[in-house]
Image: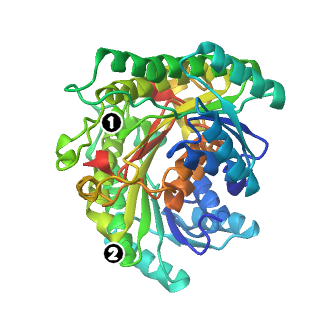
């Protein structure tokens, strides 16, 4: 197994794409810490994955809080002894992140930046400090929204673009510690969150580019992101760092 | 399906053009190690048979075919032979490349045209002919091997103190390959065929030490690519592990293009 004896932290690892990533990493042999901002979601996912025979630690944290993240990292080490893999998947996304540019208020602006960018930054810093001396792999979950405009998602797109810059800079600064840093940019993946967005957009009669036909002519499944996380977390991608893999069925190539 | 099984290629039939070359053998081995039957093909049938023989002795499923990318007849024959022997072609790796000519100071018109015949026309014809077979199957995966020099310009300073250079045609052909990957992904997508590209960084062989040192300094990981570095990406893009990925160009470059 590709990730035998490895320990992974997946923020937002209890729902949607994040849960798919947690499951894939666990199936590949990793012990996984699932981080959610509400403990119920973390525990429900942990229960489900444990019943499949995986070793999972559920953890409740607001990732924009340095203190909580330090506790997350310390407890991970206490429980599993090390951190090899970090997947920064948690984000304010979907309808929670939606607001037109002209009407967006400070609260949403700050909340989105706090979780998507500052939170990713803090978890990366704290986890990377524990990876120094043993190496590791860090994966940011960006979005096709980093490359293409999405209506009502200005802050979201801005934070997802920011992660691409962070990916490259972290790759540069952490290379000498044998820590590789890459990103995944998913396109339209069928999750509960994206279903809600679509329903709301349809109600508001917003269709736009988001619903255009794409080369593979289907939406992605939440299970289709995890294997790429396994690829980037493992020695399979030994010569890759600072790179972003787009998983979008060809959405962006037109 | 279990994540580990998504990276398997049991029962799949793959063609790797140039699959017996110094770079291609690692792709061939990678695919065969996860269960695929790999046909290695080039104009040098003897070399292909040698590689196929050696890998078969290890228990891998590898066979050889003669393929001239300068001839559409030759490409069609290889495609037909594989389809009639195995009933299908699941995976095409466009890996072969003609490195005819040098930089603009030395490359001749004839060298440029002969390189284009293989790198452009041959690549297109292989994609078209195998694409037709994959359309009939309503499934298939194509992976094109481009290069960092299809994305960025070579830094000629790294060749100082050696007689090496980066061929002019290589930049032209490899860049074209990347956008043709997108074209093909768009065109073949509705038939359930995925098309992706890998842009590897320099592969360490027997280059002069000074070059290896100069090159390595340009990467984040501080080294050239070695035997195993391409294998993971080849299996990833050929397998169902990348089922929703199409039209992409994976940089396997040690961070060369990240800075």
- Whether A126 is drawn above or below A254: the answer is below
Q: Could you classify mark 2 by the number of other residues whose Cα lies within 10 Å: few (under 14), some (14-19), or many (20 or more)?
A: some
Q: Position of residue B181 (x, y in %)?
A: 49, 26
- Whether B198 is drawn above or below B227: the answer is above
Task: Work out whether residue A101 or residue A28 is closer to the camera in this orientation and state it.
Answer: A28
Real-space Cα separation, disc 2 to disc 1, in angstroms: 34 Å
Task: Work out whether residue B58 or residue A158 is closer to the camera in this orientation and state it.
Answer: B58
Q: Please give left or right for residue B204 compared with residue A219 in the image.
A: left
The part of the image, by quadrant, that contains residue B138 is top right
Foreground: disc 2 or disc 1: 1
Give the total number of marks visible in the rendering: 2
The part of the image, by quadrant, that contains residue B170 is top left
Q: Is residue A225 visible?
A: no
Q: Position of residue A8 (x, y in %)?
A: 52, 68
The part of the image, by quadrant, that contains residue A14 is bottom right
Tell if the residue under mark 2 belongs to the same chain as the one under mark 1: no
Q: Position of residue B119 (x, y in %)?
A: 45, 24
- Residue indicated by mark 1: B149
Tell me the residue at 57%/38% (across/down): A189
Task: Work out whether residue B84 or residue A126 is closer to the camera in this orientation and state it.
Answer: B84
Q: Position of residue B255 (x, y in %)?
A: 33, 52
Q: Chain of mark 2?
A: A
Tell me the residue at 55%/68% (across/down): A39
Tell me the residue at 41%/22% (across/down): B115
Looking at the picture, the colour scheme in use is rainbow
- Residue indicated by mark 2: A129
* Dot 2: element: helix
- Whether A33 is drawn above or below B34: the answer is below
Q: Chain of mark 1?
A: B
* Dot 1: element: helix
């Amino acid at each position: 197994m590709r990730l035998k004896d490895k320990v992974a932290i997946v923020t937002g690892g209890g729902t949607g794409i994040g849960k798919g990533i947690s499951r894939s990493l666990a199936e590949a042999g990793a012990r996984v810490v699932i981080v959610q901002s509400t403990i119920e979601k973390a525990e429900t996912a942990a229960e489900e994955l444990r019943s499949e025979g995986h070793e999972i630690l559920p953890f409740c944290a607001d990732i924009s809080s340095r203190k909580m993240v330090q506790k997350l990292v310390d407890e991970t080490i206490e429980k599993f002894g090390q951190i090899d893999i970090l997947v920064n998947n948690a984000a304010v996304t979907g309808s929670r992140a939606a607001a037109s540019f002209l009407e967006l208020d400070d609260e949403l602006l700050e909340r989105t930046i706090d979780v998507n960018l500052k939170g990713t930054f803090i978890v990366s810093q704290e986890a990377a400090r524990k990876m120094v001396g043993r190496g590791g792999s860090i994966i940011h979950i960006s979005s096709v929204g980093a490359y293409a405009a999405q209506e009502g998602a200005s802050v979201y797109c801005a934070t997802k673009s920011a992660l691409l810059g962070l990916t490259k800079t972290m790759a540069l600064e952490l290379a000498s510690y044998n820590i590789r840093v890459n990103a995944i940019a998913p396109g339209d993946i069928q999750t509960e969150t994206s279903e809600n967005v679509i329903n709301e957009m349809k109600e508001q009669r917003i269709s736009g580019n988001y619903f255009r036909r794409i080369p593979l002519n289907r939406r992605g499944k939440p299970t289709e992101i995890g294997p790429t996380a396994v690829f980037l977390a493992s020695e399979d991608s030994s010569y890759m760092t600072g790179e972003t893999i787009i998983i979008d069925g060809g959405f962006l190539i037109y | 399906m279990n994540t580990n099984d998504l990276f398997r290629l049991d029962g799949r039939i793959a063609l790797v053009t140039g699959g017996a070359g110094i770079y291609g053998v690692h792709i061939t081995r990678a695919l065969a190690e996860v269960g695929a039957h790999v046909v290695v093909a080039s104009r040098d049938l003897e070399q292909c048979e040698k590689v196929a023989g050696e890998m078969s002795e290890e228990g891998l499923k590898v066979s050889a075919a003669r393929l001239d990318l300068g001839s559409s007849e030759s490409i069609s024959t290889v495609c037909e032979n594989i389809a009639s022997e195995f009933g299908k072609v699941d995976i095409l790796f466009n890996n072969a490349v003609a490195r005819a000519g040098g930089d603009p100071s030395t490359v001749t018109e004839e060298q440029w045209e002969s390189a284009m015949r293989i790198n452009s026309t041959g690549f297109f014809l292989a994609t078209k002919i195998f694409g037709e077979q994959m359309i009939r199957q309503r499934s298939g995966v194509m992976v094109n091997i481009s290069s960092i020099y299809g994305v960025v310009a070579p830094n000629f300073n790294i060749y100082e103190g050696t007689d090496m250079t980066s061929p002019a045609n290589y930049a032209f052909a490899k860049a074209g390959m990347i956008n043709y990957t997108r074209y093909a992904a768009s065109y073949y997508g509705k038939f359930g065929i995925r098309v992706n590209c890998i842009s590897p960084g320099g592969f360490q062989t027997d280059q002069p030490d000074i070059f290896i040192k100069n090159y390595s300094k340009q990467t984040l990981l501080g080294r050239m690519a070695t035997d195993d570095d391409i294998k993971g990406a080849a299996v990833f893009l050929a397998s169902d592990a990348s089922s929703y990925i199409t039209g992409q160009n994976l940089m396997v470059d040690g961070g060369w293009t990240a800075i």
